[in-house]
Amino acid sequence: MKAEILGKEKHHARVKIEIPAEAFSQAVDRAFKKLVRNADIPGFRKGMVPRKVFEAVYGKKVIYDEAIQDLAPHAYEEALKELGLNPIARPRLSFNQIEEGKSLIFTVDLVLKPEVKLGNYDDIDVQEEKVEVTEDMVNRILRDYQERFANFEKVKDRKAKVGDILHVELKDKESGEWKKVQIFISEEIKDALEGSDVGDERELEIKGDRFTIRILDIMERKLPELDDSFASSLGFGSLEEFKDAVRKALEEELKRKAENNFRERVLDKLVELSQLEVPEEALVEEMEYLKEKDAERSKEYGMTLEEFLKRIGITEDKINEYYRERAERRLKREFVLDAVAEKEGIFITDGELEEELRRIASENNVPYEKVKAFWGDKERVEILRSDIIRRKAINRIIEYIKGRGEKRGNVDPSSDRADS
């Protein structure tokens, strides 16, 4: 196999790949033997059709196409390695010579990963958020627990108000029969039901339909007392122990959120400080990918993509802009982190990959062997490797940012040390 770059400009390159005639002829022979097994031609048993007869019925092209599928992908991968090219979008192949007895020659138009001029780590002026758990925050959680374990009791000495549950009879419009149901008095329907009493009949509109209801009982929500007994029912020794547990959980949650937010802001700032240009072809592919993922999510909720986007505030005239911004942000982040990984000599060992697979298996409660089999696909495992390397790259930046000003000294931003 021979490979050469015919032209290279900015984010694009054209590569010529030539597969020797002998290799192509052998691939054509293999292709025919594979296809003839299922050839259904009157007068011949399957697998026993002469090649000339097969070609007369199906044509040579079907054999050549099968041979190309056999040879071209491997030749393409080998050419990329040999020439040191890193494409980021689907290649465009053009076949210049397809003839048995001659070399198979084709050209590939590639979209290449853009060059990144990394910003200076010292210019990342992002500060960590201070985490503080206040008594109000703790009390809100305690209130949530009270409401979760609330009971409803009959009201005898007052009329209905927001937050009550009404036991009512609802008159069926078609049969005229009365059916017993429960209605929670929310803010949306308080005008129709607030101030009502047992025995009252009211008109109620629900989703455009009007109903007549007769009130049987008014049920008031009663919160449990916030005391040692309540804490004990939740498995704590005392109310103070319960509060301490809530405070600790809140602090951990806030720290986790603050850390994630810090990482996001650091990465965004590094992208802002860096210089790179995302190729249009890569943007278009990424936009298509994001749309497909959102369309899948939409189906899970029983909606179209347009309905899903409308729910999150994206109008039809803004859809393209929305996906373009998301795609550009994602790709810029990936390219910048890849540049950091290259600069810092970050890589992933087989042991780290296995550790990641075991983590995925554990978090999703799936057998390790099943996870390993899923990620055994070459394309999938390369995606996983890239994700881990990028994660290590942002960790390296975070380490440097947090290390500034500490007594242990700064991490050298120009270091080429390996992260094993």
Image (spheres, grey):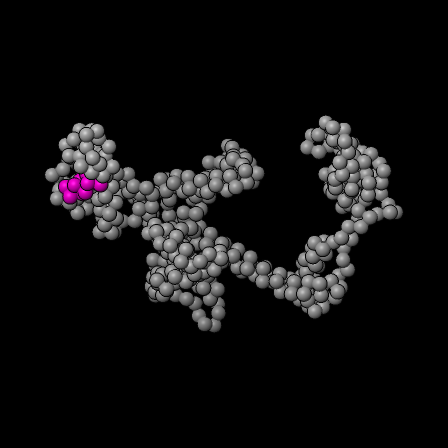
Q: Examine the image and state in which quarter residue 226 appears.
A: bottom right
Left-right relation of 184 to 99: right
Q: Nearer the viewer, residue 171 or 13?
A: 171
Farthest residue in the top direction? 174
Locate residue 418, reporting x and y percent.
34, 65
Q: In the rendered image, is residue 253 in sight?
A: yes
Which residue corresponds to the image point at 55% horizontal and 57% vertical from the top-left? 257
Locate residue 414, reporting x and y percent.
36, 62
Q: In the rendered image, is residue 323 in sight?
A: no
Q: Nearer the viewer, residue 96 or 242?
A: 242
Left-right relation of 61 to 281: left
Which residue corresponds to the image point at 59% horizontal and 59% vertical from the top-left? 254
Q: Nearer the viewer, residue 80 or 52?
A: 52
Residue range of the region highlighted in magenta in the rendering:
25-35
Q: From this view, report whether residue 271 is shown above or below residue 58.
A: below
Majority SS type along the magenta span? helix
In this figure, what is the number of numbered marks? Answer: 0
Q: From this view, report whether residue 234 is shown above or below residue 209.
A: below
Q: Examine the image and state in which quarter residue 419 appears.
A: bottom left
Left-right relation of 341 to 252: left
Locate residue 301, reporting x and y percent.
55, 40
Which residue corresponds to the image point at 30% horizontal and 49% vertical from the top-left? 86
Q: Examine the image and state in which quarter residue 59 appears.
A: top left
Farthest residue in the right direction? 157
- Residue 375 is inside the magenta segment: no
Left-right relation of 238 to 287: right
Which residue corresponds to the image point at 40% horizontal and 58% vertical from the top-left? 369
Locate residue 17, reporting x and y percent.
19, 43
- Residue 28 is inside the magenta segment: yes
